[in-house]
Amino acid sequence: MLMIKPLSYTQDSAYWFSKIAHLDWPIWLDSCAPLSSGRFDILAANPYKKIINHHNQTYSTDATGNQIQVTTLDPFSFIKEHIQQVNTHITIPENYHLPFCGGALGYFGYDLGRILETLPEHAEHDLDLPDLAVGLYDWAIIIDHQNQSAYWVSPLQQKANSLDIYQQLSKSPIHDTTTNDNIKTAIPGHFTDFKLTRQFNSNLSFNDYKERFNKIQDYIHAGDCYQVNLTQRFVAPFTGHPLHAYLQLRQHNPAPFACYMDIGDNQILSCSPERFLKINHNIVETKPIKGTVPRGKTAAEDASYQEKLLNSEKDRAENIMIVDLMRNDLGRSCEIGSVITPKVCELESFKNVHHLVSTVRGTLAKQTHATDVLKLAFPGGSITGAPKIRAMEIIEELEPHRRSLHYGSIGYISYDGHMDTNITIRTLICHQNHAYCWAGGGIVADSQLEQEYQETFDKVTIIHETLYELSGLSP
């Protein structure tokens, strides 16, 4: 049985996050509505169990962090085992249309791919972060911006003090805007203004990028691969609280699959526009992005950029390669013959860029769990290339540093079988007072060096500029 209780609706879900941000492992799956096309926000904290993969070991801890189980299972199967221990007959009443009723929330890092496939080890592994951090949450706040409603949900069989949290939340005075002062009050003594202390530096100069670009072209012409996603990493030191930075980023770069997650020593700030995998009533969907141009400064310039992207044979070819890859990946977990591509290379416009986005769908095969779908398609093809495994081998050879959790996935797996996850692009990782972000693009046979290099900056310009302005730095 599921407990659902109403809360006051606020257009800005930052208000509700300010009420739980001081709790353990708070997570905010943020649709950035109404600034984006998103509908639901999911907020939770105080997981009753945590599942972590670190240093190639997967284990679970209780709410206080005490290790309670080490497993030889892969992380996806371990999460599946824990979800299935909960009553699988939990359902959400149809009149609520809610996406989540408790379950797993967290991140799956790109480097989890090493557990699924044997890959070489060339890139420097300098970020000592868990490759997976997923909490099992027995309560959540759900904001529905379409119906302008808000709910607290909890499966009754869990034994946490979640009702006490609901009582506190239900008595909170409602403010539809959330300022930094509100957050400072919510996180006393810890929330200070975020500031970069210098500009971002890349781990690849133009000449470094050129050398790697040419190497990929050699591999393509030799028939080794068709496409490789080549990425550079940016890093800058900072002071202050990352949540302050996220509140600014979500205003300047709203995205339907944004997220803020705090796991204690590390924070993840994602402004992702890209869906990786969604399961809703046994329909599996992925929406890979390939093809990017910046927004124009005038309406005429913006229209010109849109037309250029829509007519780009190179970008369309790049997108269709990944569509083929994702059709194959979905085919591994969907009913035979059910995978379709209802939309190919459609234009989707965001505040700062235009993208080409395709949609692939299939019907979930019987006896297949959401974690199986995630495992069989991980990591997403749009950030590897094709064929996937060879592209990942080349990425490991050419990129100076491991990708860590970037280009992985963040999202939820609900007890009732629903799932929605992003591709963690346009994402900052805050670790030991340094902010890291990555940007890249797919290299194909007819890619142009200068254009590909510039595209990587187009994708992160708004993130850099927002944080520079916040920090009083010049670009």
Image (cartoon, helix red, strand yellow):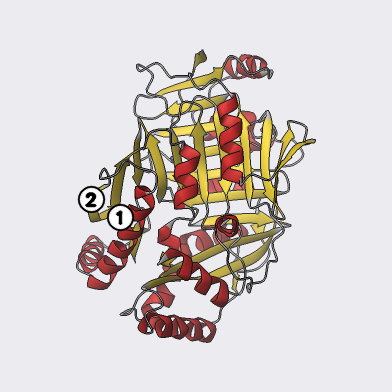
Report the residue at 38% width, 24% height from top: 148
Q: Secondary structure at mark 2?
A: strand
How far apart marks 1 and 2 lie (CA) works out to: 8 Å
Q: Tell me the crowding category of disc 2: few under 14, some 14 to 19, or many 20 or more residues within 10 angstroms, Cα based.
A: few
Amino acid type shown at disc 2? Lys
Report the residue at 51% width, 49% height from top: 409
Question: Is residue 116 among what the camera can see?
Answer: yes
Q: How many tags in the picture?
A: 2
- Report which quarter residue 38 is drawn in: top left
Q: Earlier in the sequence, mark 1 or mark 2?
A: 2
User: Mark 2 = which residue?
Assistant: 343
Q: Position of residue 238 (x, y in %)?
A: 68, 59
Amino acid type shown at disc 1? Val
Q: Secondary structure at mark 1?
A: strand
- Decide which of 116, 437 is in the foreground and name it: 116
Question: Is residue 296 among what the camera can see?
Answer: no
Vertical position of residue 235 compared to residue 138: above or below: below
- Report which quarter residue 419 is drawn in: top left
User: Mark 1 = which residue?
Assistant: 357
Report the residue at 48% width, 57% height from top: 425
Question: Does the CB distance between marks 1 and 2 fall below 8 Å?
Answer: yes
Vertical position of residue 186 compared to residue 422: above or below: above
Report the residue at 52% width, 87% height from top: 207
- Decide which of 241, 221 is in the foreground and name it: 221
Decide if residue 318 is on the left or right side of residue 27. left
Decide if residue 219 is on the left or right side of residue 410. left
Quarter holding the C terminus?
bottom right
The disc at residue 422 is none
- Decide which of 407, 151 is in the foreground and name it: 407
